Amino acid sequence: MSLSNTESLSASELVNPHPLPTNSSTSATSSSNQSPMNNPGFVDRRKQGGSRVTGERRQFGSSHSGLSQAGRELALAIDQYKLQNHRRYITCDEMLHVISQLGYHKD
């Protein structure tokens, strides 16, 4: 576009050279108040089931099957700690706390 073509454009065309098409049947105030919930294709999933408390999803449900008895006991204790404290991951200090609660200690 040359300089002479730019001079013939209005200020609004310079700011937004590709304006969105406007719907002449609605006013600017009603279009700004539209929400997705007023859209007939919108499904508000928050209202369908409410807050489901079915327990926490476990990614590796059978990961303790190959462990020794002591390893399985530790893994279950850590899982229980995570559930009680709403933690997905625990720190080393929290793991040490779980191990201590199982009766292990450093000599």
Image (cartoon, rainbow, N blue to C red):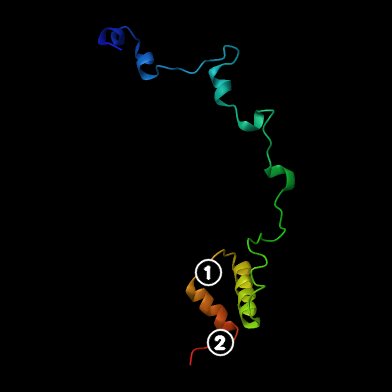
Residue 51 position within the rendered picture, expressed as x and y whole percent measured from the top left: 70, 52
Q: Position of residue 22 (x, y in %)?
A: 53, 15
Q: Is residue 11 above or below residue 76?
A: above
Of the pair 42 and 47, the residue shown nearer to us:
42
Q: Give, as a three-letter code, the residue at label 2.
A: Tyr
Q: For the point 35% across and 16% down, which residue is it?
A: 14
Asked whether disc 1 touches disc 2, contact meaning CB atoms under 8 Å apart, the reply is: no
> Residue flagged by tag 1: what amino acid is it?
Ile
Q: Residue furthest front?
A: 66
Name the residue that disc number 1 marks.
90
Residue 21 position in % (x across, y down): 52, 15
Q: Position of residue 45 (x, y in %)?
A: 69, 42
**What SS does tag 2 mark?**
loop
Identify the element where label 1 is drawn. loop
Q: Tag on residue 104?
A: 2
Left or right: residue 18 versus residue 97 is left
Q: Is residue 97 left or right of residue 61?
A: left
